[in-house]
């Protein structure tokens, strides 16, 4: 991750720091380059000529964009990072927003999948950007497995976990599978897998199927393998998912509205879900909010986007996933950071209350 030199902020004198702060704050509020006259009218107490000279110095330091001098200056990604790390004053989340988040999370608390989706919706709606959340690896112990015939070529596989969560998957099956074969498969899975996590169950299933080849007929063996593969990721190698909500908010963003090429790049980035999961995983390395600004990440180099992410935890206080917001680099960091942080805390609280364990 690219960062400005650690002494760069201290290298700015009081005047340069105030001008830099004024430019970045105005840019984050408007999304437009800031001119010296605009800054002088804000009561900064300096003439436009003095401000222009300082702007030139800041541009030489790599903190301001050197282009379009007559139209004003905008902070570079490096400049925004310096501002966020050293000068940003994060606002407190207001009580109305807290109440809204609490109510929406409570309404979705009956199902973890719904809660994750709602958390992504919440940050998307309030922040006016796209919301992202990674689903945790399912590592709670298995309580029960059932195979239920649905029509002639479909079977519903039901997996019940010790934390009370229920997951369902459909699989294709051979024609004419009998009720006794379904029951035999359910009995086999329950006997060998009950009390084990999914990762433990995968190895156990492979081992036990080899030992039981003479006891189970071919159809039952295939049913067990196909059913378990739906959760173990054997078929598609994807154990985790990325839930994205609020893409339409990006189209309404005035900074992106007239720049269709940047919109295209940003939507392409949202489709690279595995790359975004890896970025959000970086937010799982600690308990604090993490930011990825523009060219700091190769994924955002073309669109100039920013990602604000916070980790969430299970009932054992272990970080299991991350919640975030993606939008333009001039997103309102002071407002969005506490929204993402508080929503992640409420998601953690809900998982803790449900006894969710990974």
Image (cartoon, rainbow, N blue to C red):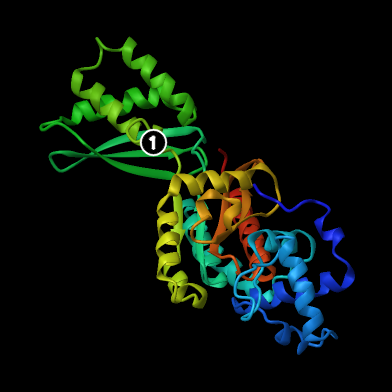
Residue 16 visible in the picture? yes
Percent across and percent down for residue 317 are 67, 43
Q: On the rendered structure, is 205 left or right of 91?
A: left
Residue ID at (69%, 44%): 286
Looking at the image, the residue that sits furthest to the left is 176
**Closer to us: 62 or 299:** 62
Q: Which residue is drawn at 31% across and 42% down?
A: 169
Q: Is 63 rendered above or below residue 46? A: above
Left or right of 209 in this view: 283: right
Q: Residue at x 42, y 19 (%)?
A: 204
Secondary structure under badge 1?
A: helix
6 above or below 216? below
The spot of residue 1 in percent (x, y) is 64, 47
Give the residue at mark 1.
Answer: 231
Q: Number of callouts in the render? A: 1
In the rendering, at what x and y percent does residue 193 appear? 42, 25
Residue 314 in view here: no
**In the drawing, does residue 93 fall left or right of residue 169?**
right
Residue nearest the observer in this picture, 289 or 179: 289
Most distant residue in the right direction: 14
Residue 208 vs residue 255: left or right?
Answer: left
Quarter of the figure with the C terminus: top right
Task: Identify the residue at horizontal 55%, vertical 47% (top origin).
Answer: 279
Mark 1 packing: few (<14 Cα in 10 Å), some, or many (20+)? many
Residue 324 spot, x, y in % from top left = 57, 57
Outermost residue, bottom side: 41
- Position above or below: 6 against 189: below
The one nearer the camera, 36 or 135, is 36
């Amino acid at each position: 991750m690219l960062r400005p030199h650690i002494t760069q902020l201290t290298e700015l004198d009081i005047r340069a720091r105030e001008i830099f702060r004024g430019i970045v704050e105005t840019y984050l509020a408007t999304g437009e380059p800031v001119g010296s006259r605009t800054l002088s009218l804000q009561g900064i107490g300096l003439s436009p000529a003095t401000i222009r000279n300082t702007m030139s110095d800041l541009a030489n330091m790599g903190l301001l964009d050197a282009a379009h001098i007559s139209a004003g200056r905008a902070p570079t990604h490096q400049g925004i990072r310096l501002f966020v790390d050293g000068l940003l004053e994060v606002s407190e989340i207001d009580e109305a927003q807290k109440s809204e988040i609490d109510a929406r999370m409570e309404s979705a608390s009956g199902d973890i999948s719904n809660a994750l989706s709602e958390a992504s919706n919440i940050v998307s709606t309030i922040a006016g950007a796209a919301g992202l959340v990674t689903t945790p690896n399912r590592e709670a112990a298995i309580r029960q497995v059932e195979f239920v015939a649905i029509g002639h070529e479909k079977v519903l596989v039901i997996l019940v976990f010790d934390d009370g969560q229920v997951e369902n998957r459909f699989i294709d099956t051979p024609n004419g599978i009998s009720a006794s074969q379904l029951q035999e498969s359910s009995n086999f899975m329950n006997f060998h897998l009950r009390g084990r996590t999914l990762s433990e169950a995968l190895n156990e299933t492979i081992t036990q199927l080899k030992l039981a080849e003479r006891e189970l007929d071919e159809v039952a063996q295939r049913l067990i393998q196909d059913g378990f593969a739906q959760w173990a990721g054997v078929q598609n190698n994807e154990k985790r998912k990325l839930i994205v909500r609020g893409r339409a908010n990006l189209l309404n963003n005035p900074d992106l509205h007239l720049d269709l090429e940047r919109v295209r790049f940003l939507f392409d980035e949202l489709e690279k879900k595995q790359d975004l999961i890896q970025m959000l995983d970086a937010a799982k390395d600690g308990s604090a909010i993490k930011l990825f600004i523009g060219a700091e990440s190769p994924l955002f180099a073309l669109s100039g986007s920013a990602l604000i992410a916070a980790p969430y935890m299970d009932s054992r206080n272990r970080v299991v996933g991350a919640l975030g917001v993606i939008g333009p680099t001039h997103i309102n960091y002071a407002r969005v950071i506490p929204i993402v942080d508080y929503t992640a805390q409420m998601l953690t609280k809900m998982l803790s209350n449900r006894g969710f364990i990974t």
